[in-house]
Image (tube, rainbow, N blue to C red):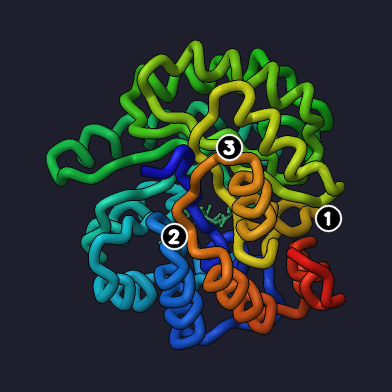
Amino acid sequence: MSDVQIIDVSPRDGLQNEPVVVSTEKKKKLIEMLVRSNVKKIEATSFVHPRKVPQMVDAEQVMKQCKEFAGIEFVALIPNLKGFQRAIQANISEVNWVTAATETFNYKNIGMSIDENFAQFKRIVQESRILNMKVCFSIAVSFGCPYEGEVNPAKVISLVERAVEAGADRIGIADTIGIATPKQVKRLLAEVLQVAQSTPIAIHLHDTRGMGLANAYAALEAGVKIFETSASGIGGCPFAPGAAGNLATEDLVYMFERMGVKTEIDFEKLLEAADFAASLTSNQPLGRIRQVEKRGSLR
Ligand code: COA
Ligand code: ZN
């Protein structure tokens, strides 16, 4: 049994901001390598508008390929009802609905207000029950917004309350622009866990300012058990200027295992997946652990 669950989001968050569209075949290889490293849950794609996010144009094909991997949970991000319809057509068992903690980010990201977004969310939760689908609710820019600045934690708590009431199967708190500090993370997540009661809570971290691991530790201390990270730390958001990579999955796994927090992930195989993820993007490997190994130091 692992002590924590790691959801690798590299095929979605990792690739969505890349200038070059990665082929479906290469996305499948990345997924396959993550599966080989024993990652049990992967956010594989998003059903968004291909004109807005051309990298996700092959969402249907990617999800079709995922069917080959038995025993792995795959998630697809959806921004609206149309995305939900596409997910149903693709026969997906879990979707990740995205909203934002601020109105401006919500408009820029998905073109609607938070209230409109909630009205749609409630509808899809009802439909998902009939279809036996899981619906997660992710809150982007939970700590800071590139347009509105500092985010009042009360706003996030109120969204968590509404999501619980609507019937979310999991709630994700995202630091989209990597602005949170460990103290903020610990305080907010402790409150979120209390409000959410039995609804599982995930934290989604970006390492933009080098605070990813410290924030992951703070979340762990608060009681969070689900972490969203990306192999090699690839990633960013096309609608958040300056948003850089996610926290690297291999860095988090390294820290947790050294601390005695079991992940059940095969570290060597994960490093191979991370190298492959880095080769798909214009970035050098962003994970710190990978850089250490390249200098020949002990791991
Ligand atoms: N997938 C594909 N096409 C979609 C769609 C979806 N999820 N949602 C809407 N569309 C299409 C509509 O069918 C319509 O097509 P038409 O012009 O051929 O009739 C067109 O898009 C406009 O529809 P509208 O409802 O006005 O959508 P919009 O233009 O306001 O776009 C989003 C809304 C959510 C689809 C778009 O903003 C988007 O894709 N955002 C990306 C969010 C994202 O990936 N963020 C990063 C991760 S958090
Ligand atoms: Zn992200």
Q: Residue at x 39, y 21 (%)?
A: 164
Answer with mark 3 or mark 2, whichever residue precedes in sequence: 2
Q: Residue at x 34, y 72 (%)?
A: 60
The reply to whether residue 154 is in sight is: yes
SS category of the residue bearing label 2: loop
Name the residue that disc number 3 marks: 203
- Contact between marks 3 and 1 (CB within 8 A): the answer is no
Name the residue that disc number 2 marks: 39
- Rounded to the nearest angstrom, the CA distance separating label 2 from label 1 is 29 Å
- Rounded to the nearest angstrom, the CA distance separating label 3 from label 1 is 20 Å
Whether residue 226 sits left or right of residue 173 in the image: it is left
Image quarter for residue 17? bottom right
Q: Residues within 10 Å of mark 3 (few under 14, many from 20)?
A: many
Whether residue 134 sits left or right of residue 54 in the image: it is left
Name the residue that disc number 1 marks: 242
Look at the picture and state if 286 lies above or below 5. below
Whether residue 41 sits left or right of residue 22 in the image: it is left
- Percent position of residue 188, x then y: 66, 19
- Percent position of residue 116, x then y: 47, 32
Identify which amino acid the numbered label 3 is placed on: Ile
Answer with mark 3 or mark 1, whichever residue precedes in sequence: 3
Q: Residue furthest front?
A: 298
- Percent position of residue 160, x then y: 50, 21
Identify which amino acid the numbered label 2 is placed on: Val
Q: Residues within 10 Å of mark 2 (few under 14, many from 20)?
A: many
- Rounded to the nearest angstrom, the CA distance separating label 3 from label 2 is 17 Å
Q: Residue at x 73, y 36 (%)?
A: 215
